[in-house]
Amino acid sequence: MAKKRSHGEGTLSRKENGRWEIQIMVGYKPDGKRDIRSFSGETQREAKAKRDEFLRKREAGLLTGKDLRFEEWADTWFENHKDNIKPTTQDSYRYTLRILKDHFGRRKLSEIKAMDIEQFLKKLRKEGRSDSALAQCRGMLFQIFNKAVANDIILKNPVAFADKMRKRPPREKEAFTADEVRTLLRELPEDKIGWSIRLMLCTGMRTQELLGLEPRHIAQDGSSINIAQAVVMVKGTAIIGTPKSYDSYRTIPVPELVQYCARNLRSTDKKFIWEAGRPDMPCNPSHFRTQFKKALEGVDGVRVLTPHCCRHTFVSQMQALGVDIETIQNIVGHAEIDMTRHYLHVQEPKRLEAAQRFSEAFSKKGKGTFGNVLDIVDHLKSS
């Protein structure tokens, strides 16, 4: 019969083959169950010696790859690394870490080979994970194993020898057509969600930027919007943080046909244009997405896309209107197209001209020259 030991020494028992075994709990698994380690020997003294050696190495952080399980080292790596990353990025890291621990969790570091990494990534792809998700998992695995090599826990990094997954052809980003934009500008409700969607379509603002707006960020006449902050998610809670990148700090010229929307949103006594249930707290993006979907479902002849598609729509329509890429990038604060710093030197008249072109193209008074351009572009895309 097993006997419990005091002071966390574990449970001692003698097996049918005559060997002695001590079991101790060293923590909890990702599924919440207890993590039990066993140490056996011909005598009680031998079993205890193995247990004591394990606990000594564990306390000193000297476990080798033969002893150390992936989940233990991954947690140690994250605890040491997390101070180097932003709180918002930490949430993303934790999510990726859970995926890795669910797959490799109790396997010993020394047993994980390059082929195991390849099979894991193939499994993720079969599950429908995106290329970016695969890249994040591979990148984090590389860091975890690289740090283990640097600390003499394992001899080599298996990720360095694993074949990389070939990227899938990029999917074309969805955007509203020119006719859909005209319909939305005309048929959306004249309320907070309707005004917000109109502004997103006509300025290329990100959802998080819109939700971070305070009345003070909008010009009194509605002619411009200053992007100085954005909503970020930390442990499921929406808080105010910085814009996505350095280039995202900007002042956006608002096309004349939707300046009334900006003025209406500015007319609030609340701290944020979109406020949560609690005072002085910004709205959660998931709540805004729900309101966005409901608004679009109420407009006939328009596809129900995501809020971010408004940004793609703005960029594609501005390109169709002949606005140069430097000016577009300056307005939307987009840093993904290998052009960043020199966009800051785009002259203000060119930005205002771009906003005017958008106004003319979608004006209620008529399509105008630029509106016809958009129709031709849509026709060519569909043919």
Image (cartoon, grey):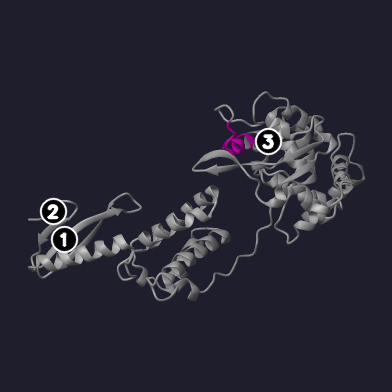
Callout 3 secondary element: loop
Queried whether the magenta region covers residue 280, the answer comes back as: no
Question: Which circle's residue, 1 or 2, is located before the other in the chain?
Answer: 2
Q: CA distance from mark 3 to mark 1?
A: 60 Å
Query: Could you tell me the amino acid type at mark 2?
Result: Arg
The residue tagged 1 is 22
Mark 2: secondary structure = loop
Packing grade of label 3 (10 A; few <14, some 14-19, many >=20) is many
Q: Position of residue 202 (x, y in %)?
A: 78, 41
50 and 132: which is toward the camera = 50
Q: Is residue 285 magenta?
A: yes
Circle 2 sits on which residue? 5
- Amino acid type, mark 3: Leu
Write down the region rendered in magenta.
Answer: 281-292
- Please identify, in this view, whether the residue under mark 1 or under mark 2 is nearer the observer: 2
Residue 383 visible? The answer is no
Residue drawn 17% across the image and 51% down it: 7
